Image (cartoon, rainbow, N blue to C red):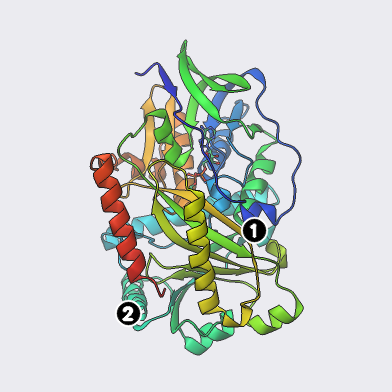
Amino acid sequence: MQRQYVAKRPPKFAGQAAWSAILGTVPAAQPLQGNVTADFTVIGAGFAGLSAARRLVQLNPGAKVVVLDAARVGEGGTGRNSGFMIDLPHNLASENYAGANDGLDRSLIALNRLAISFAREAVQDYGIDANYFDQTGKINGAATASSHAQNKSYGAHLQVLGECHEMLDQQAMFELTGSRYYVSGLYTPGTVMLQPAGYVRGLARGLSREVVVHENSPVTAFRRQGAGWRVETSGGAVSTGKIILANNGQIESFGIARGRLMHIFLFASMTEELTGDVLRRLGGQPRWGITPSDPMGTTVRRIDTGQGGNRIAVRSCAEFCPSMESTEYKMRRAAKIMRRKFDERFPQLRDVKMEYIWSGPLCLSRNGVSVTGEIDNGVFAACCQNGLGTTRGTLTGIAAAECASGKSSAITEFFAQQAKPYLLPPAPLAKLGATAYLNWKGWRARHE
Ligand SMILES: Cc1cc2nc3c(=O)[nH]c(=O)nc-3n(C[C@H](O)[C@H](O)[C@H](O)COP(=O)(O)OP(=O)(O)OC[C@H]3O[C@@H](n4cnc5c(N)ncnc54)[C@H](O)[C@@H]3O)c2cc1C
């Protein structure tokens, strides 16, 4: 048992998180001030942390739960993602998202759907705007013959799994998106399209009846104190019985899972609001979401007024960032690439400006496992979502809360059976290897 964990650095976010900005302002944050006590303290208010908090209050009525986040809710990693809450296998390391085997994929689908049900129930309980949790499904868009082949092979895999899907042709893709770029699309109906900031803000607001959420409160350390722990921020401290770490890759900053986690930064942009003539030139439907058929390609999403305005969001480019910080140079480079991707898809909108450009962290392990379970006496983890934080984050959060409450379920059992994340090669080799791999995969998917 370790006596203390000290953060090497607080999380840093580059670029304004559009999903939060387009929803307008929220009341001022209430950072932690002074000393308080809690039964459970959750570090991180993203998908994992807020799901953990909800599960904790379900299982421990009357318990005092405190959530601490370094940023505002909706402005950390969770508010920086593209909002695809995917029910199906989404293995970023594979050629077409299929998992290692059919059995594993079936159990992942069942678990992802449990996560979606858990989130849907929260949306209902807390009265979260249905526009922020929209079960419209998604499309794997193919821009070339080779990615169309990837779509067909993924479709065949879904057939074996007994999962609904439909192949759209070029004309159908044009009618949906207003773009002639895509030669085909594989539609699957089970994905929920989140307005990520709207969803997590709604979770935090709903939870605030029973849980205290302190934003702008980066945890600098937690130390053993009697039978519990003392969690410290620059403004105060929580004396707590148990801790749930739901800070994804930042768990490594506390020295946990050191040398085992791959920190990747993804980049994204969102247009200014599209109005009148621009909308006519765009055509297509008001809401759709396209993930690339090649996992290393570009995600494109159209949203409408109910979700923060008529806008298009683009997500592209991946950088291996062991330092967990992206640089100005990388942002500028990614911005140029995303602009090109946008223009290729929507040549009729060359005059439309990108209002927001941002980056955000992903945390992966070489063997695709998460960091979960009890990692020290009374300290539980809900981290390393392997790129699918919407569902996997929800699941790790539920699992951590259940373990901390002494409950077992299909979700805790799934994570209990996982191996530890494999060790990475020594730092310089890992950086070289990962960068070369990402560059090669990115180049191969350059049209997608
Ligand atoms: C551009 C982009 C697009 C993406 N698109 C998708 C998608 O469409 N679908 C999908 O499923 N996933 C997507 N992802 C991945 C997804 O965003 C992450 O997997 C997800 O955010 C992980 O959720 P989490 O709650 O585990 O961690 P996070 O969302 O990263 O939340 C962790 C929180 O912990 C806080 N924190 C960290 N350190 C501390 C500390 N010391 N003290 C206090 N608080 C701390 C952070 O501020 C943060 O708010 C995308 C990621 C990016 C970058």
As drawn, the label of residue 132 is 1
Instruction: Give the left or right position of residue 433, taking residue 211 as reference.
Output: left
Q: Residue at x 35, y 55 (%)?
A: 107
Residue 418 sits in which quadrant?
A: top left
Position of residue 182 measured from the top left corner of the image (x, y, whole percent): 47, 81
User: Within 8 Å: ligand 1 and the Cβ of disc 2?
Assistant: no
Q: Which residue is mark 2?
A: 146
Q: Is residue 279 above or below residue 268?
A: below
Of 340 and 18, which appears nearest the observer?
340
**Pointers 1 and 2 in contact (CB under 8 A)?**
no
- Say few, some or many: other residues with alpha carbon within 10 Å of mark 2 (under 14 / 14 to 19 / 20 or more): some
As drawn, the label of residue 205 is none
Residue 342 sits in which quadrant?
A: bottom right
C-alpha span from label 1 to label 2 = 34 Å
Q: Residue at x 70, y 35 (%)?
A: 29
Of 292 and 204, which appears nearest the observer?
292
Position of residue 408 measured from the top left corner of the image (x, y, whole percent): 40, 37
- SS for dot 1: helix
Q: Amino acid at mark 2?
A: Ser
Position of residue 207 measured from the top left corner of the image (x, y, whole percent): 65, 39
Residue, far front? 329
First along the sequence among labels 1 and 2: 1
- SS for dot 2: helix
Residue 373 sits in which quadrant?
A: top left
